Amino acid sequence: MGRSRGFRTYAGLVLAAFLFSAAASAAGQRVVIEGILARVNDRIITTSDFRKRLQEELDQRTKALPPDQLRRFAKDLFQSMVEEAVLLERAKEKDFKVDKKDLDKAIKALRERNRLTDDRAFKAALKSSGLTEALLRERYRQNMLAQRVVQSELKPEEITSEELRMEYEKDKEHFRTPEKVKLKQLFFPVAEDGSDREAVRRRVRGVVARVRKGADLEAEATLAGVEVQDLGEIPVGDLRDAVRNALEGLKAGDITDPVSTAGGFQVVRLTARIPAGYVPFEKVKEQIRRKLSRDRFRTKTEAMVNNLKKQYLVEVHEDLLKKVLEGGSGG
């Protein structure tokens, strides 16, 4: 795995951590010095914690983010770090622990997902992602603790068939399918210099005329030395204008007149017309169930974390955070 894939060290956290740019300030700009951005009981988040976390994640990105997105990511990252601190405090209260064997298993699964079973490749991937193995393991340990807190506080909620159906109807336009056509084609190439174009055109017209009189398409293709290609189902809106126009008014089983292309002539058989409609409920029921489950779990998790914040000493130094985000100075 190279930098383009990277590690998702917090995959699975309900409150996902987003990133912002902590690239070095340009010449002449002031730099925020070390300070405490937030406190959750005895846990603190410093400016260097914030930037270090950011840089590790930025090293996994292949594209820079524009300034407006960077700032939004910055705010999300900060909030997620506070929320993680709250969850870790709850894990401490409940005396949750992560066994070494469970951590080893999680890291092994990560390596297998990213095809990094070779130790040398694993170390190279860590380096390219700005991580050490110790830091990766610590991040996973914290992630697993946070997950256990959420799982211990929140119980799975059953989603009824009626609720699934209501969600389907509410979001039905999301499942709209466009008008499609099912096609097969024959392609007759011409010489690069186009010298035989008219001769090929006459030959193609002959094939079309014979098929329209009842000749077998496959047999005609074989005699002409071309193949019948199954194009499958294609949305009408994705067709080339020339092909869409040629199909106008045709019924299933009909073939088009020869359609001229840069490299030759195309003859298309309309196998079927599939009207616009909706993906059937039964086909997307489980997809809807997963989405509803994720949404409800996220909402409940946010409510749980907000409730815990009221129980703990949570302080956020907004002025310093603002200076960090704007690249100013603060102490």
Image: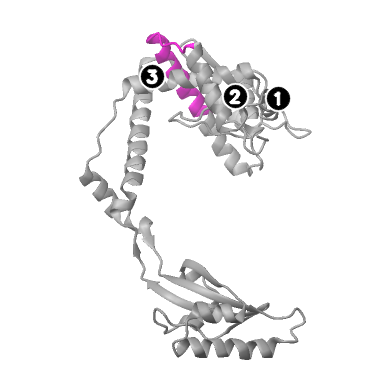
Q: Are there few (<14), some (14-19), or many (20+) residues within 10 Å of tag 3?
A: many
Identify the residue at image location x=63%, y=19%. 133
Locate residue 236, reporting x and y percent: 46, 72
Q: Check disc 3 and report the residue beneath it.
A: 149
Kind of residue at disc 2 = Phe
Amino acid identity at mark 1: Arg
Say which amino acid is labelled 3.
Val
Quadrant for the N terminus, please. Answer: top right
**Mark closer to the observer (2, 3):** 3
Q: Are marks 2 and 3 in contact (CB under 8 Å)?
A: no
Badge 1 marks a residue whose secondary structure is: helix
Measure the alpha-carbon separation of dots 1 and 3. 35 Å
Tell me which numbered mark, 1 or 3, is placed earlier along the sequence.
1
- Figure quadrant of the C terminus: top right
**Observer-nearest residue: 38 or 234?**
234
Give, as a single range, the part of the protein colored magenta.
78-99
Magenta stretch mostly in which secondary structure?
Answer: helix
Report the residue marked by disc 1: 120
Q: Which residue is mark 2?
A: 50
Task: Measure the C-alpha gap from mark 1 to mark 2.
Answer: 29 Å
